[in-house]
Amino acid sequence: MEFLGYRRAAGTVGTRNYVGVLSAVVCVNEVVEAIVRQVQGTARFTHHQGCCQTPLDIGLVNKALIGLGRNPNLHSVIIVSLGCESTDLSGVIEGIRASGKRVEHLVVQEVGGAARTTAQGILLAQDMVREASLQQREPFPISELVMGMKCGSSDTTSGLVPNPAIGVASDLLVAAGGVSILGEVTEFIGAEHILARHAADAQVGQAIFNLVDRMEKRAMAVGEDIRGGQPTGGNIKGGLTTIEEKSLGAIAKAGSAPIQAVYEYGERPAVRGLVVMDSPGREPEILTGLAAAGCNVIVFATGRGAPQGFPFVPVLKITGSRTAAEKMSDHIDMNLSAVIDGGDTIPDAGQRILEELTRIASGTMTKAEISGYTNSMDIYMQGPVI
Amino acid sequence: MAIDAIVLNEIDNVATSVQELKAGQQAQVRLGREMHQVAVQEDIPYGHKFAFRPITRGDDILKYGEVIGRATGDIPAGHHAHVQNIESLRGRGDLRKEA
């Protein structure tokens, strides 16, 4: 199978061709939004970080911004900063430039305020979008797809249909030479021993146990059990009773391919095949982490229907619930509810997911892209805001 | 034929409803290729679980052929099996870590 993508200098392939406007710090989000509103062909990344944080978290901000800037779906990048943030701007700019992309930088305190920076940014972005628009799509094998996997607003049907069907699609992609990334470590809890059995070797298996241990300790360090927040109230209403039950359904997305490696949040996989990335389950942070890791497509299983997408990575929404497909039709891309009624099978549904993914990768828009429901995003933090 | 609930593994003791079920009805439950009937004792919301066979307090709750928690009370067949009578065994500070 092939898709039509955009060739990038670093040897990666984009499924979209945006000029990215990235916020270096929370204080310039409104400038970034004003620029993006005025220029077609741009995509923003805004967040709430970049200042008054521990060095560990500032390090995560720097890494996430480099990863996002390098994402193959961005043709070129404008970084907007305030001038007094803690983010390491020269490191971020050099990190993105290393991928061969054009990177421009606007500093609000140097340009002279939000309005002047917005005006400069608009003109700069117009020039860069024109440059980007000269590029044509070319055919590539699906081995160039880097697929992120996520489930959200889960109910009982998530574990019955879309998650195992995504597992089939992931196995097919991996067999074709592609990369698929499983995150949501909070949703391994109670099922990590099963996931660890899929590890390619003992070291990777241990790394999976370590990720879960770290996530449980993180919750306990603030005096809370993870079960206070997982399963969520919506999950419980949908019929999920315990975190073990939610986890068994969630890890069905991993399919049966061996897990080749375990990575930190937003880290770019250095191997092909199925890998695991440290990340929480909440949409804004995990979608950002998958984008920073270089995903050029994301599949998202939902039981009750979730609207979130990501500004420059297409997010394919899949449900096994007839109710969600009907009530949330403007957010659902694929309805697999026929599997529950017995008219369809998981292997066939998985094959169709991969076929739909190649269409999306070639430019067909997802519901999240059409509705523009892509503004909820953030970078995953470990420590306090200070 | 229309089914009311699914059991995912033959060792499971709970079934998952795929319809709204009413107390008193006979639920058509699919387990692999076989169909079973269970008399529903309480209203079961869509997507929720009920005891497929009698469960005793302290029993493991089995779904996907795996343990998803423990019964905190007896759950006779056909009764709603959810947060009111099942507790998680993981992610909690009040239990000793499992080996």
Image (cartoon, rainbow, N blue to C red):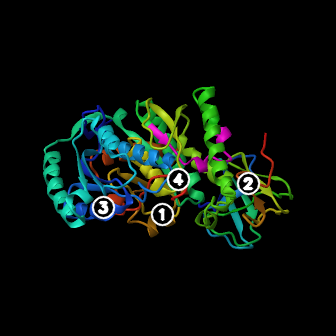
Say the numbered circle drawn on residue A370: 3
Task: Give the amino acid at mark 3.
Answer: Ile
Protein chain holding label 4: A
In front here: A204 or A350? A204
Query: Mark 4 vs mark 1: same chain?
Result: yes
In front here: A2 or A343? A2
Q: Which is in the foreground here, disc 4 or disc 1?
A: 1
Check disc 2 and report the residue beneath it: B92
Protein chain holding label 2: B
Task: Give the amino acid at mark 4.
Answer: Val
For the N terminus of chain A, the quadrant is top left
User: Where, by quadrant of the figure, is residue A50 drawn?
Assistant: bottom left
Marks 3/1: CA–CA distance: 16 Å
Task: Give the amino acid at mark 1.
Answer: Gly
Check disc 1 and report the residue beneath it: A305
Q: x, y (%) of residue A346?
A: 52, 46
- Rendered residue at 17%/51% (across/down): A129
> Any magenta on residue B84?
no
Q: x, y (%) of residue A100?
A: 24, 35
Q: Which residues are magenta?
A: A180-195
Q: Which comes sooner in the sequence, label 4 or label 3? A: 4
